């Protein structure tokens, strides 16, 4: 099927059965096309141009295996942006500075299957739609959101990332958050617009309360009084879009 997400899963047989069982309860689009329980075989599959993988799921703690030997062995570094590592460490610990592209995500061992499926859908969409330059911006947005205390295990993180990304591509959307961005996200994620709006609002509030104060204040101090109010969804999206554009010598108007 066209919408199938062809996936390689690298983990123990026990974990594979768990993942397959959980995915089957919530999605018919994820196809586990390849499976292996060791990194050497995984690299063979990953580096085979005929594998045609949409996504790669890797257990970062297979006994006797070295995860970095796998991640640094990709012939096509772009495939790192299709890779999700299941591990209880922070994404920063997988900062592969010698590569052009970073990992898509690192999710905890006690991940919710819906969060994994959501990430797989995003990777599939990204593979079909975005070129290399766009992917680097997409990942830049994720980096900023994490610095602001918004974790990838929240639906609002994924909605915000796509909203910011789309507004970066087409700045005119910044004046149509309610009329165009929410409907676009609702269609992409198969959610109601009201759910999208609430999840984004919740993610912003959570990040505001627990995030990096200095970084938040640096970004929003000219528009929002940090101690008295929080940015609206539209303000939040616009300020991050403007930050990225300014770093590139562009303007949003």
Image: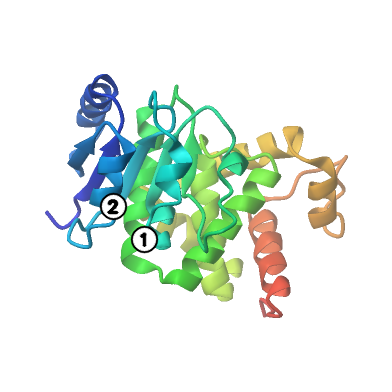
Q: Secondary structure at mark 2?
A: helix
Residue 178 visible (yes or no): no
Compared across the picture, whether 92 is left or right of 118 comes to: right
Quarter of the image for residue 205 reads top right
Compared across the picture, whether 93 is left or right of 122 comes to: right
Compared across the picture, whether 50 is left or right of 154 comes to: left
Q: Secondary structure at mark 1?
A: loop
Q: Camera-side residue: 63 or 247?
A: 63
For the C terminus, the image quarter is bottom right
Residue 21 % position (x, y): 21, 24
Residue extending farthest to the left is 1
Residue extending farthest to the top is 14
Residue 232 visible (yes or no): yes
At 87% across and 41% down in the image, what residue appears? 228
| Image mark for residue 167 | none
Residue 235 % position (x, y): 70, 57
Residue 136 vertical placement versus 35 (above, below): below
Residue 45 % position (x, y): 23, 50
Residue 62 vertical placement versus 211 (above, below): above
Label 1: few (<14), some or many (≥20) within 10 Å?
few
Earlier sequence position, callout 1 versus callout 2: 2
Residue 120 vertical placement versus 12 (above, below): below
Residue 226 % position (x, y): 85, 44
**How is the model colour-coded?**
rainbow
| Image mark for residue 75 | 1
Q: Camera-side residue: 240 or 141?
A: 141
Quarter of the image for residue 206 reads top right
Marks 1/2 in contact by CB < 8 Å: the verdict is: yes
Q: Camera-side residue: 89 or 220?
A: 89
Q: CA distance from mark 1 to mark 2?
A: 8 Å
| Image mark for residue 46 | 2
At 22% across and 27% down in the image, what residue appears? 25
């Amino acid at each position: 099927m066209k919408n199938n997400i062809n996936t390689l899963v690298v983990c123990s047989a026990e974990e594979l059965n768990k993942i397959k069982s959980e995915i089957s309860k919530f999605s018919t689009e994820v196809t586990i096309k390849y499976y292996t329980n060791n990194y050497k075989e995984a690299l063979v599959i990953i580096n085979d141009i005929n594998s045609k993988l949409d996504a790669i799921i890797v257990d970062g703690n297979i006994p006797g295996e070295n995860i970095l030997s796998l991640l640094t062995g990709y012939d096509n570094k772009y495939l790192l942006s299709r890779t999700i590592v299941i591990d209880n460490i922070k994404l920063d610990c997988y900062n592969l500075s010698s590569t052009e592209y970073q990992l898509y995500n690192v999710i905890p061992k006690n991940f919710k299957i819906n969060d994994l499926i959501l990430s797989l859908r995003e990777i599939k969409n990204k593979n079909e739609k975005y070129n290399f330059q766009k992917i680097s911006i997409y990942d830049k947005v994720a980096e900023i959101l994490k610095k602001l205390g918004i974790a990838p295990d929240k639906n609002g993180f994924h909605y915000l990332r796509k909203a910011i990304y789309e507004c970066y591509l087409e700045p005119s959307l910044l004046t149509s958050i309610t009329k165009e961005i929410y409907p676009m996200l609702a269609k992409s994620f198969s959610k109601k617009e009201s759910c999208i709006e609430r999840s984004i609002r919740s993610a912003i509030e959570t990040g505001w309360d627990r995030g990096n104060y200095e970084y938040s204040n640096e970004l929003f101090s000219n528009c929002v009084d940090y101690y008295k109010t929080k940015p609206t969804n539209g303000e939040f999206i616009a300020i991050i879009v403007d930050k990225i554009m300014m770093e590139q010598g562009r303007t949003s108007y």
